Amino acid sequence: SDNVEGGRISARGLAEAIGGKGKVYINSTNPNVSSVEGREQGFAEVMKNEYPDITVIGPDYNLDDAARATQQTAAILEREQDLAGVFGTNVFSAQGAGQAVINAGLGGHVQVVAYDATKDAIESLNQGVVTMVLAQKPFDMGYMAVQFAAADAAGVTSLPKRVETGFAIIDKDNISDPEIAR
């Protein structure tokens, strides 16, 4: 999937959730990883170009450790008491950030976006730890992968090198929608 576009979609979802103004924080995984760099880039680009009343803080890198993401986000919450939202560039980032928000008694006040619709991310959404989850449409990815494998086995040589399956934002309002759930 297009990680830059995923970052853009996450930014717009978070901006809408916080009313288009305030401070948001990026908690990421590792520096110099193309997928998360793309997510960070798309997120920051949209905030800068489309939401001038939103200030972006970070990113901080948690090295794929949810406990570290919790500590980092807790420190940001302590320093930036008017923080409105957090973008977690993967599940560990969002879980840790969401836990810090809950621990600070700010659940529902500080919005948290999780990138990747894993089982854990959906559980975090159901528990109110995160506000929304950006899904990379795994059903569509799997479906297309099977189609490509069948075509390749049949000797088709004109397959495109890249097919975008798109994204969906999952939140409490649409989590039960069968089209989103798949």
Image: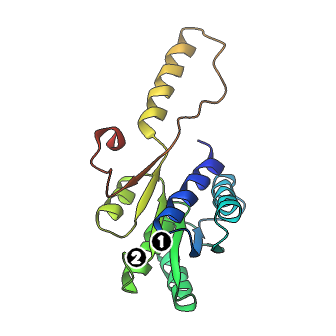
Disc 1: CA contacts within 10 A as few (<14), some (14-19) or many (>=20): many
Viewer-closest of 150 and 86:
86
> Seen in the image, is 62 located left or right of residue 141?
right
Tag shown at residue 99: 2
Looking at marks 2 and 1 on the same chain, the residue that comes earlier in the sequence is marked by 1
Q: Amino acid at mark 2?
A: Gln
Residue labelled with disc 1: 66
> Seen in the image, is 135 located left or right of residue 52?
left
Viewer-closest of 149 and 84:
84
Name which residue lies at 55% across and 81% down.
Answer: 72
Disc 2: CA contacts within 10 A as few (<14), some (14-19) or many (>=20): many
Residue 26 seen anywhere in this rendered image of the structure: yes
Name which residue lies at 58% across and 34% down.
Answer: 164
Q: Position of residue 73 (x, y in %)?
A: 52, 80
Q: Position of residue 33 (x, y in %)?
A: 68, 57
Picture quarter with the C terminus: top left
Residue 111 vertical placement versus 121 (above, below): below
Viewer-closest of 85 and 53:
53
> Seen in the image, is 9 located left or right of residue 135?
right
Q: Position of residue 71 (x, y in %)?
A: 51, 83
The part of the image, by quadrant, that contains residue 142 is top left
